[in-house]
Image (tube, grey):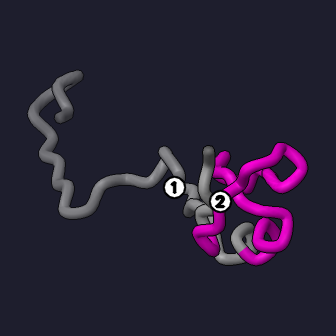
Amino acid sequence: MKVCNNCGSRLSCGCQRRTAKDGKACCTGCVAAYNASIKPKQQTSTNIAPTNVTTKYKGPGMQI
């Protein structure tokens, strides 16, 4: 028997169970409030250069 992740009530029948955005089980009365309380994950860009990086030129073709 599953339990609602929002209010903690037992979900005994399939008509009471709803799946939230994060895949967890919620009851029909709480699923909208639970989905609204989930914070979206922040997307990070992979093209951002790391901080505090310094480079020195060491001759032709050997820049590090």
Kind of residue at badge 2: Arg
Task: Please tell me whether residue 7 belongs to the stretch shown in magenta.
Answer: yes
Bounds of the magenta segment: 6-33
- Label 2 residue SS: strand
Task: Please state if 63 lies on the left or on the right of 19 as rendered.
Answer: left
Residue 3's disc is none
- Which residue is located at x 66 percent, y 76 percent? 37
Task: Please tell me whether residue 30 belongs to the stretch shown in magenta.
Answer: yes
Dot 1 corresponds to which residue?
44
31 in relation to 59, above or below: below
44 in relation to 39, above or below: above
Residue 14 seen in the current view? yes
- Which residue is located at x 73 percent, y 50 percent? 12
- Label 1 residue SS: loop
Examine the image and state in which quarter residue 26 appears. Answer: bottom right
Dot 2 corresponds to which residue?
10
